[in-house]
Structures are given as structure tokens and as C-alpha cells.
Image (cartoon, helix red, strand yellow):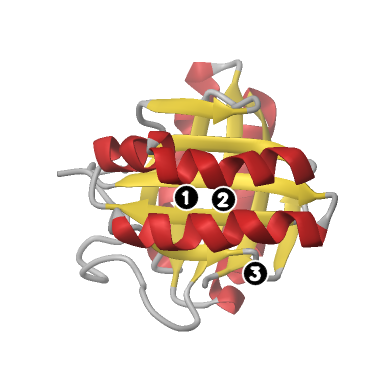
């Protein structure tokens, strides 16, 4: 069964006022079996604009991710986030399709040191974008990336969302950056730049 994810990015306007959100949200997320993959760690903006705080949470499935967000306990905490920050919050189903790095690694990197790409994309030329996907696979395989999210059904529970969202796991931050800047990926990027607009960050895991 595909996992579920929260992808959240925000700018906090009042750090003290924001604290009650964390105090209520973190135990509620844990109660629903959520696991922080990224939690406000250091990051680099690779494309487009970004917000100061970025969070990725993994749940056992999409339904649980939605249930946690809509739970009374989380919504009570969420009022403090809404009052003291602005941003976007997406709930999305994980990816279960073919992995370019299958056969090289057995699954996504986990634990200390893991890093991620978080991508928000609107595609306006699907045919050219298909060329990006084919070329992108070469870089992802070489640098042993693993798609956790790659499109999929989603709900923008707060703020706006782009139509396609991607989360890629790498063994460490240096590898995440090396993959992005590699000749293989930059060749793929040439197709995407013609076919889509995007915001992309590389971020340290929680």
C-alpha cells in the first residue's frame, strides 16, 4: 500500500506564538504514526522561490495522512500555525511505481544524514516533460535516489499547490546536491525547463 505524506512550507511571523502549534501538532502526528522526514532543516533553494521552514511527514497511507490533518487534536493546534505563519500544506499519496535505482539499492535511504529533494511543478508541455522523465532516470539511478512522491492524488489542505509534486530521498545532503548539479541531471533539466515551471529545494532530513 502506498504511503501518505504531508509536504508543508511556511514562513513563521511570530516564533513564540507558533510554539503552541508545535506542542500540539507533534504528539498528534505521533499518535497517527507519522514520522518526520524533514523538519525545518537547513536547505538550499535550487529553483524558484522557497519559504523559510519546510516539513515532510510520512504516514502509513494517504487516508491516515488526511485523518491526522482533519483530527480535532491537530486542528486545535493548527489554529496557532494559521495565526502566526503563512504558507502551504499538501497531503499527497506516495509513489509505488518503477524506481530508476531499483537493482542498485533496495529502497529509500533512511535514518541520520538522509536528505531530500522537494519539488513543486506545473507542467505545460507534457510531451517534452516525458523526455525529462526519461533523462532524469539516468541521474537518479547513478546517485541512488528513490522516489517517495511522484505525482499522485493529493489535497491542498491549506494554501495553493502545484499540479505535480515530487519528493526524492538520497543517502545524504552532499549526494542530493551532487545529483542536481551533475551533467546527467542538468541535461534532463533542459527538457523540464522548456516544459514546466517549478520550485525545488534540497533539504537535510530530520
Dot 1 falls on a residue whose secondary structure is strand
Residue 93, visible in the rendered structure: no
**Which of the 4 quarters of the picture holds residue 188?**
top right
- Picture residue at 41% right of the left edge, 28% below the top: 154
Which is in the foreground here, disc 2 or disc 3? 3
Q: Position of residue 173 (x, y in %)?
A: 58, 75
Q: Which residue is mark 2?
A: 118
First-in-chain label (2 vs 1) = 2
Within 10 angstroms of label 3, few (less than 14), some, or many (20 or more) residues?
some
Residue 49, visible in the rendered structure: yes
Mark pair 2, 3: CA separation: 13 Å
Disc 2 to disc 1: CB gap under 8 Å: yes
- Picture residue at 77% right of the left edge, 55% below the top: 17
Image position of 93 (left or right of 14): left
First-in-chain label (3 vs 1) = 3
Q: Position of residue 36 (x, y in %)?
A: 45, 64
Q: Which residue is mark 3?
A: 41
Relative height, residue 205 to residue 113 (above, below): above
Dot 3 falls on a residue whose secondary structure is loop
Disc 2 to disc 3: CB gap under 8 Å: no
Within 10 angstroms of label 2, few (less than 14), some, or many (20 or more) residues?
many
Q: Which residue is mark 1?
A: 167
Image position of 151 (left or right of 119): left
Amino acid at each position: 500500500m502506498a504511503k501518505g505524506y504531508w509536504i508543508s512550507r511556511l514562513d513563521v511571523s511570530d516564533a513564540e506564538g507558533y510554539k503552541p502549534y508545535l506542542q500540539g501538532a507533534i504528539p498528534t502526528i505521533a499518535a497517527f504514526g507519522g514520522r518526520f522526514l524533514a523538519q525545518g532543516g537547513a536547505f538550499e533553494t535550487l529553483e524558484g522561490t522557497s519559504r523559510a521552514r519546510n516539513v515532510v511527514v510520512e504516514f502509513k497511507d494517504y487516508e491516515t495522512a488526511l485523518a491526522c490533518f482533519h483530527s480535532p487534536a491537530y486542528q486545535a493546534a493548527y489554529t496557532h500555525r494559521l495565526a502566526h505563519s503563512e504558507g502551504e500544506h499538501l497531503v499527497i499519496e506516495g509513489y509505488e511505481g518503477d524506481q530508476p535505482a531499483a537493482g542498485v539499492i533496495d529502497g529509500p535511504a533512511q535514518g541520520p544524514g538522509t536528505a531530500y529533494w522537494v519539488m513543486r511543478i506545473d507542467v505545460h508541455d507534457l510531451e517534452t516533460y516525458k523526455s525529462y522523465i526519461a533523462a532524469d532516470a539516468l541521474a537518479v539511478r547513478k546517485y541512488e535516489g528513490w522516489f517517495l512522491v511522484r505525482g499522485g492524488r493529493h489535497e491542498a489542505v491549506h494554501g495553493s499547490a502545484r499540479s505535480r509534486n515530487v519528493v526524492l530521498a538520497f543517502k545524504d545532503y552532499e549526494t542530493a546536491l551532487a545529483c542536481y548539479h551533475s551533467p546527467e541531471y542538468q541535461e534532463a533539466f533542459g527538457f523540464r525547463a522548456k516544459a514546466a515551471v517549478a520550485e525545488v529545494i534540497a533539504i537535510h532530513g530530520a
